[in-house]
Amino acid sequence: MNTSSDEKRAGKKEASDDITPQAVDDAGANDADASDIADAATSRFASGGSSASDNLQQASGLDGKQHTGISRSISRRALIYGTAGIAALFALGGGLRLTFGAVVPLRPPGGQNEAEFAARCIKCDRCRSACHLGAIGVASVNNGLLNARTPTMQFRRGYCDFCAGVPDHRAVDGTDPGLLCVANCPTGALMPFDKAAEWIAPAVIDAEECVAFKTRGACGICADRCPFEAISLDTNLRPVVNEDKCNGCGYCEFICPSNSYRSYSGSNRRGVNVERREGRRP
Ligand code: SF4
Ligand code: SF4
Ligand code: SF4
């Protein structure tokens, strides 16, 4: 038993008269056992003697050199498996989808050439701020990591009137500034856009969601109100899009009531949706 154990035991005796001498002796003995074990372990560690890990090592029959070899081979194996996993993920399209997204976002007018747009857009948000109808939103990571926070049309919240409805739509020198999203883009990611010859993307009727396909002519709002007369009704009173006239303004998608009429379907789509397609109008 060492001095510090004696001191501890003396301290405990002073601390309480209720504690019996026998109990204190027992406690002191326990302290002594614990500190003796700690001392023994410390001295063994300091002298480089055998320790628990030494015993384990001996029992397993492995020395330090062999351990290093195993960790090296595990690291190498992990690296090979990791690389193979990533390659397989990309092969299956998972990595590409994660990076670029499964669906390329619908760009504002003038951003339809995706390669040029992606090379120039700096995600500054100026086009979105400039839109007076709130038709421009931002893409999320669901559109791919590289597309996150790039501008995208959101025709559930607004539509594009090509800035025709902007009050006092004249620059101070009296000239027409054109489309405000394009005019405010500092890098040329959004190029000049001709709504008579180009499209943001074409409107596409979804027969599964359109009310007119489920009933006989209960709805024809899109045909009535398309600002460019690009939708008509066929002989069954179902809407048909004329792609020669549609410029993708999104007004039909904005006003389509299918989600309200057919809310029980739980679909995220509408009876008409503007869907991305590369290239100019036909
Ligand atoms: S052209 Fe005008 S209305 Fe259309 S998205 Fe650009 S800013 Fe908005
Ligand atoms: S069909 Fe829809 S997207 Fe196309 S011009 Fe008419 S309202 Fe706009
Ligand atoms: S507004 Fe929508 S539901 Fe109505 S006819 Fe057009 S696409 Fe169909």
Image (spheres, helix red, strand yellow):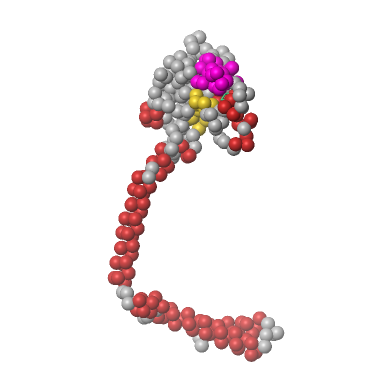
- Between residue 206 and residue 137, name the one nearer to us: 206
The extreme right residue here reads 18
Indicate the quadrant where residue 185 lies: top left
The x, y position of residue 175, in whole percent, is 48, 10
The x, y position of residue 140, in whole percent, is 49, 37
Q: Is residue 231 magenta?
A: yes
Decide if residue 8 is in sight here.
yes
The extreme bottom residue here reads 22
Q: Which residues are magenta?
A: 221-241
- Between residue 213 and residue 167, name the one nearer to us: 213
Left or right of 18? Residue 70 is left
The x, y position of residue 142, in whole percent, is 48, 39
The x, y position of residue 200, in whole percent, is 46, 23
- Does residue 61 lie above or below 222 as drawn? below
- Does residue 101 lie above or below 210 as drawn? below
Question: At 49% from the left edge and 30% from the top edge, which residue is drawn?
Answer: 152
